[in-house]
Image: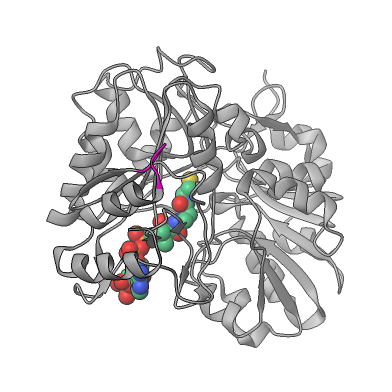
Amino acid sequence: MMMNWQEKYRDKIYTAEEAVSHIRSGDKIIFGDWAGEPPVLIEALMAKANTLKNVEIIHGMSPGPNTHIDKAYEGHFHHTSLFLGEKTRSAYREGRVDFLGGSNFHEWPKIFARNPDINPHWAFIQLSPPDEAGDCSFGISCCFTEPAARTAAQVIAQINPNMPYMGGEKINLDAVDYLVPAETPLYSIGRLDIDKKTQTIADYVADLVEDGATIQLGIGTLPDAIARNLMSKHHLGVHSETLTEAMMELVEAGVIDNSMKTVNRGVCIGAQAAGSKKFYRYLDHHAMFATMPVDYVNDPFEIGKNYKQTSINGCIEVDLKGQANSESIGGIQYSGVGGQLDHVRGARLSEGGKSILTLNATAKDDTISKIVPFFEAGNVTTVSRYDIEYVVTEYGVADLKYKNERQRAEALIAIAHPKFRDQLRFQGKKIGVL
Ligand code: COA
């Protein structure tokens, strides 16, 4: 009779409280990315916060309850965040979170390994139950969860039966120091209704996606709307930071078959997956989906090996010279680069590739133009004018590749909201691009 894995590895099995009892003041802990964060270990760590001082927690978007970032834990925990989201933004402004800006996502594993301030003693991760060989899947979050386990001195893993066993990178239980079996729900993402403006942008983007292309799409309403518009395409493939529920629908419809991919033919490759519980169940043992570490999936050279790699990402504003800011508002960090620049550059290296940046033409009820003559002080350039290609708003498509300054400014003004066009032309003359 087959031996139960918990019997085989009983010497390594602990409760969450027992496993985290080894954490000491001053230790550095990296959490797995996204759903690779293990809720039961984080709760057990918070429960012993009063006995700890200056524990450094390194994390990504960190979608969980995140109360460990609250002011109440000041002095006990300090954070280094690789991305600013809804929950970390205020803590960043209040000094409880250091932001690891200026680094591309595919390089983060090198940062954990080489920056002594965050080189982790511990990785807290979440895994699927093992197969017969004792190999666990990183499931919907291989991303920097695998690099975290690879780098940290010791690994504590929550083994969660809800985590799908997916193709791609695995970790053997021999490489894990403490095993904590616990069933908790995985973080999931709902879908929102698509408004008219979003649908218009999605229509323009879908026209740019060619049959046989390999696509990268983010999460959110716009990528969803774009994916729905791809139903009439043929032989699409996926090499994307995130695998999304819309991709499942395109696989089921036979639109995504990965048959034209020049690497990983037949398989959708992602660093992570995000969607509903139904999507996660679908991914379990599905031969067409695999997750791999971010230093592979987001490496521009690896991305660029794909034929017609087409990257689609959002940005906050674009200036008349063709620089895009995708991460700051009002001079302050708002989100992070994520894999945006990795995928823009990878698409540029790909034969027949395209990179597409999308944005609404305006913000705040049409009072602010997102096509601007220049950025306000403190706002950063995420995609430089040397890397940018297509920019799409609800007013159309600006193809900036191989264009001179004047042509770029004209193309961008043509996709700005009409009420701002004269003003942009006036400013464009002042700064010499028109
Ligand atoms: N000036 C002032 N406010 C602005 C603004 C501008 N130029 N642009 C946006 N805003 C405001 C919006 O009004 C909105 O405010 P609200 O929350 O009060 O309504 C808020 O900022 C968010 O704007 P929105 O356009 O809805 O952003 P989004 O949720 O679509 O996200 C990015 C856009 C660019 C921030 C997001 O895509 C991002 O972080 N990208 C970088 C990382 C990335 O691309 N990852 C994927 C790579 S694989």
Q: Residue at position x 80%, y 61% from top?
A: 118
In this view, 69 is above or below 80 = below
Magenta segment: 400-404
In this view, 140 is above or below 364 = above
In this view, 353 is above or below 54 = above
Report the label total: 0
Q: Position of residue 127 (x, y in %)?
A: 63, 42
Q: Quadrant of residue 205?
A: top left
Q: Quadrant of residue 352?
A: top left
Q: Residue at position x 65%, y 60% from top?
A: 59
Image quadrant containing the C terminus: bottom left
Q: Position of residue 83 (x, y in %)?
A: 57, 61
Left or right side of 125 for 25: right
Instruction: Considering the whole magenta stretch, tell me its main secondary structure.
Output: loop
Q: Position of residue 377 (x, y in %)?
A: 51, 77
Left or right side of 116 for 269: left
Residue 294 vs residue 433, the one in the foreground: 433
Which quadrant does ligand 1 occupy?
bottom left
